Amino acid sequence: MRFDAGTLLDHESFYSVCPEVLEKHIADRCRFPNGVTVDPFCGTGGNINQLAKTCRKVLAMDIDGTKLELARHIVGVYGCAKNIEFRKNDFFGGPSGQRANIVVTSPPWGGLEYLRQDSYSPLVLGEAYGGGEAIARIARSMAPKLTLHLPRTVDKSEYDDLCTYLYSVRSDRQEAMFYSVEI
């Protein structure tokens, strides 16, 4: 984040926004120059700034209107607004009908509470909404590819279970599926 260039964050986002070096790495790995990328939990916009440089269009969604306003401001700081469409949307409210090439998501981990936990289960991620499995199911209804950014405190022994589940979730599109876990 370019804090010295006018970037604004709320208290929670200051602790949860993705570091810019990681944003760039994610955007490079999720490159779709002629494609559409969806970030359904864009928050204050950390990932969307870099994704807009590697994709034709980024659909930035969040349920929190205040975070979307901060994201719009940050996009202005980075100068990448032309490739980004903002929508106030509840990802768990049902399928949006949106089609994309990839969903890049950093789901709600429980706010600052996750920092107090020794380990975090990816299978209960967003537990109030059905956990990581619900996130994968809804994301796969939107796109054949999914990037799921997990907390650093994730219980690494559960990666196999999560990958097995992700592999079992089918998209209605007949496209090749590829899963990669980067630690």
Image (cartoon, rainbow, N blue to C red):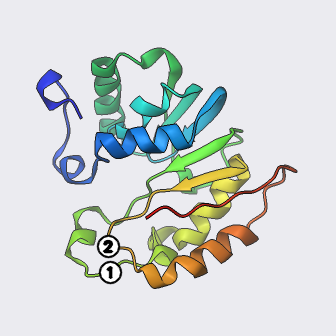
Identify the residue under disc 2. 153
Residue 153 vs 68, above or below: the answer is below
Return the x and y of residue 99 as percentages of the image width and height. Answer: 71, 39
Q: How far is the residue under mark 2 from the one under mark 1?
A: 5 Å
* Residue 43 shown left or right of residue 3 in the figure: right
Q: In the rendered view of the protein, which quadrant contains the N terminus?
A: top left
In the image, farthest residue toward the right = 174
**In this rendering, does residue 88 appear at all?**
no
Identify the residue under disc 1. 119
Return the x and y of residue 80 as percentages of the image width and height. Answer: 41, 19
Residue shown at 50% from the left, 38% from the top: 28
Q: Quadrant of residue 33?
A: top right
Q: Secondary structure at mark 2?
A: loop
Amino acid type shown at disc 2: Thr
Residue shown at 40% from the left, 38% from the top: 24
Q: In the rendered view of the protein, which quadrant contains the C terminus?
A: bottom left
Whether label 2 touches label 1, CB < 8 Å: yes
Return the x and y of residue 61 as percentages of the image width and height. Answer: 49, 39
Residue shown at 69% from the left, 55% from the top: 140
Amino acid type shown at disc 1: Ser
Residue 110 vs 80, above or below: the answer is below
Q: Quadrant of residue 126?
A: bottom left
Q: Secondary structure at mark 1?
A: loop
